[in-house]
Image (cartoon, helix red, strand yellow):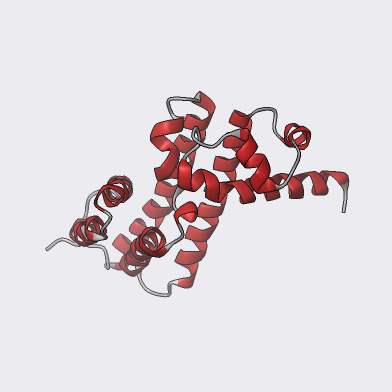
Amino acid sequence: MSQTERHLQVKQAILRSARPLIGARGFSAVGLSQILEAAAIPKGSFYHYFSSKEHFGEALLEMYIEEYLQHTEALFRREEGNGYAKMLTYCQWWQETHVNGQIGNKCLIVKLAAEVCDLSERMRAILEVGTSEVIKRLEAVISEGQKDGSITQATSAFVLAATMYQMWLGATLMMKMTHTSQPFDVALSATQSLLQRS
């Protein structure tokens, strides 16, 4: 293994070990000492991989978004149904992740967006680009569904994708307040109506 590969491997190990902590508590509430403890590394080693905590946060978001997009694409490839069925599978995965998933492994976009967008322009930009990429994936599947006839709503695929994604982000925030899956039930019903004309 080359030195560059080793450097990347250790950097990713630090990010992965600290992600559940950030996912559970937020970015500002977790201090550098807690990140070091979770990663089991000395302070000097941290600065070998990240120039600052903010740089660490940027790398964490970039890694999370990349993995999220990979998972989304794999989910759509596995689903053999039409465009509508693929969108419902995506919604089901979203709901299962937040209702049944471990606290620290839930969506970092939902967890950190309001917090870090006020702290760091770079982190805000990473989130903006990342969510735009998610919406592009959804737009492509909705367009596919419109072509195969399973999505009967004639509104532009982009508008449908953006509306749906924003609705599910809102439902996730509501679920954090209500501690019930009811906001997701509402979002699923609204998604079905949004994609298929009655």
Residue 133 seen in render: no
Quadrant into which the N terminus falls: bottom right
Residue in the image at 49% along x and 47% along y = 23
- Position of 128 with respect to 159 (left or right) is right
Residue in the image at 49% along x and 52% along y = 104
Vertical side of 192 occupied by 80: above or below? below
Residue 138 picture location, percent across and down: 39, 54
- Position of 154 with respect to 75 (left or right) is left
Residue 159 picture location, percent across and down: 28, 45
Quarter-of-image position of residue 54: top right
Quadrant into which the C terminus falls: bottom left
Vertical side of 85 occupied by 68: above or below? above
Residue 170 picture location, percent across and down: 28, 45
Vertical side of 69 occupied by 112: above or below? above
Q: Residue furthest left?
A: 198
Pick the front one: 184 or 23: 23
Pick the front one: 193 or 26: 26
Residue 28 picture location, percent across and down: 50, 32
Q: How many marks?
A: 0
